[in-house]
Image: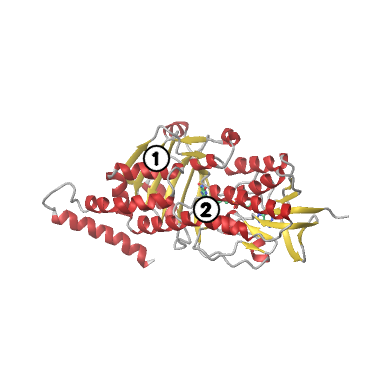
Amino acid sequence: MMEIFDVIIVGLGPAGSSTAYQLASRGHRVLALEKEKMPRYKPCGGCLSRKIENILDDDFKPLVEETIYNVILTFQGEGEIRVESKEPIAYMVMRDRFDHFLAQKAAAAGAEVHDNEPVTGIEMRYGEVVVHTKKGTYRAQYLVGADGVNGVVGRALGYGPKRNIAVALEGEANVSPEDLRQLRGTMRLDMGCIPYGYGWVFPKQDHWSLGVGSVKNLARHPGSYYSVFLEEQGLEGKIQQEKRRGYRIPLFAGRGSQITKGRSLLVGDAAALVDPFLGEGIYYAVRSGQLAAGTLHSAMTLDYSDLSGYGKKVAREMFPEFEAAQKVARFAYHFLRMGFTLIKAVPAARESSLEMLRGRLSYVDYWQGLKKNARFGLYEFLNLLKTRHRKAEATYDRVAAQYDTGLFLWKQ
Ligand SMILES: Cc1cc2nc3c(=O)[nH]c(=O)nc-3n(C[C@H](O)[C@H](O)[C@H](O)COP(=O)(O)OP(=O)(O)OC[C@H]3O[C@@H](n4cnc5c(N)ncnc54)[C@H](O)[C@@H]3O)c2cc1C
């Protein structure tokens, strides 16, 4: 007789493993099916902003390859701003090890975990879900789609298409021990190397993770931007060996997308829960898994199959943040030079950016502060704070340069 699970979870990234762990810890019968053999590589910067501490136990810390205290910010490779902090800003992990750890934790809590077993078919029947793989057929009361941006669950069950899919490129680069040492505890971010996005150099234990990503789907072929980024950062000569891979990021594109349907729900990238300013998705993957598990637990305990409560929780907790992040993105990426000048000239803007990265300042509050400080940025940008008599020519050139940047973006 075929065993009937309470919940089948498709995909064992951070979203699927968190859901599985939370449900198994509460005594539910969980089956988690993962396409790849674990541990598996996921193209990702692996940057966990410090707010991850609010939702994960400290046992992930041994996997942290580098704790970030300093940020170096440049504009198209120039005008370096160095921000130093006594407190951690972010934690760097490699996703193969991090995701494997979360999956093992779910298994230790009692979830049945099958890796190397892609889901090939899904049927919604009255009162149950049937899931097919090449190795077997499984039945459950509920189904969780945690299968990422290219997942099968959303498509099989007729969830709408994702509305803003951007492409990012990730490189894993070996560099000399001396270069590794120089970037210990520090991440580099560059604005302007790609339209509506940024480039990054994230230090890991034995290499650097580098990449470029845009929050608009303008840059469909980020390879050329990546090359320019390496050149502007003076990195080409430092890289001894490198592997590159492009991958899609499903950014939040506004309310209205369905994330629950009948006895199923979507979490993480499968539900497009990615911050539309920085492209941060790991935190929201873990958190959505936790929220989903709460709703599923209530549904099973109360014998009440409506999962819409999960959608409401996500809308309440994440959407105001994502909407504020959209506004920050519109401002910051349209007025790149001005945003950069603002960070350079106004210490409060620098500190609040760090607080936002640490997760102690919400995007909602960050946006309010940004609006207040923007006029100082504008004055500084126009050189009005430094000189009484405007240097008309220099000011004109700077405004024109700003215009050109904007024009370039609008033309895309
Ligand atoms: C280049 C790049 C850099 C990024 N950098 C960062 C960063 O620094 N910090 C950050 O927070 N976010 C970053 N992100 C976003 C982050 O990677 C994602 O938001 C995050 O991985 C989402 O987790 P998830 O569990 O929802 O999905 P995933 O991590 O994609 O996991 C989905 C899992 O489902 C499995 N699966 C798919 N189909 C099937 C199937 N048919 N059957 C069974 N299993 C299946 C996949 O194999 C995979 O293991 C980056 C993204 C990209 C592309």
Residue 39: give x, y in percent of width and height: 66, 43
315 left or right of 366 in image: right
Residue located at (80% from left, 56% from top): 136
Mark 1 CB within 8 Å of ligand 1: no
Residue 379: give x, y in percent of width and height: 22, 52
Number of other residues with Cα within 10 Å of mark 2, as a class: few under 14, some 14 to 19, many 20 or more: few
Residue 409: give x, y in percent of width and height: 36, 62
Residue 351: give x, y in percent of width and height: 36, 41
Query: Can the viewer see residue 236?
Result: no
| Label 1 sits on residue | 71
| Camera-side residue of 290 and 221 | 290
Image quarter of the N terminus:
bottom right
Specify the amino acid type for callout 1.
Val
The colour scheme used here is secondary structure
Rendered image: mark on residue 225: none
Specify the amino acid type for callout 2.
Glu
Mark 2 CB within 8 Å of ligand 1: no
Seen as rendered, the residue at the extreme left is 389
Residue located at (72% from left, 39% from top): 108
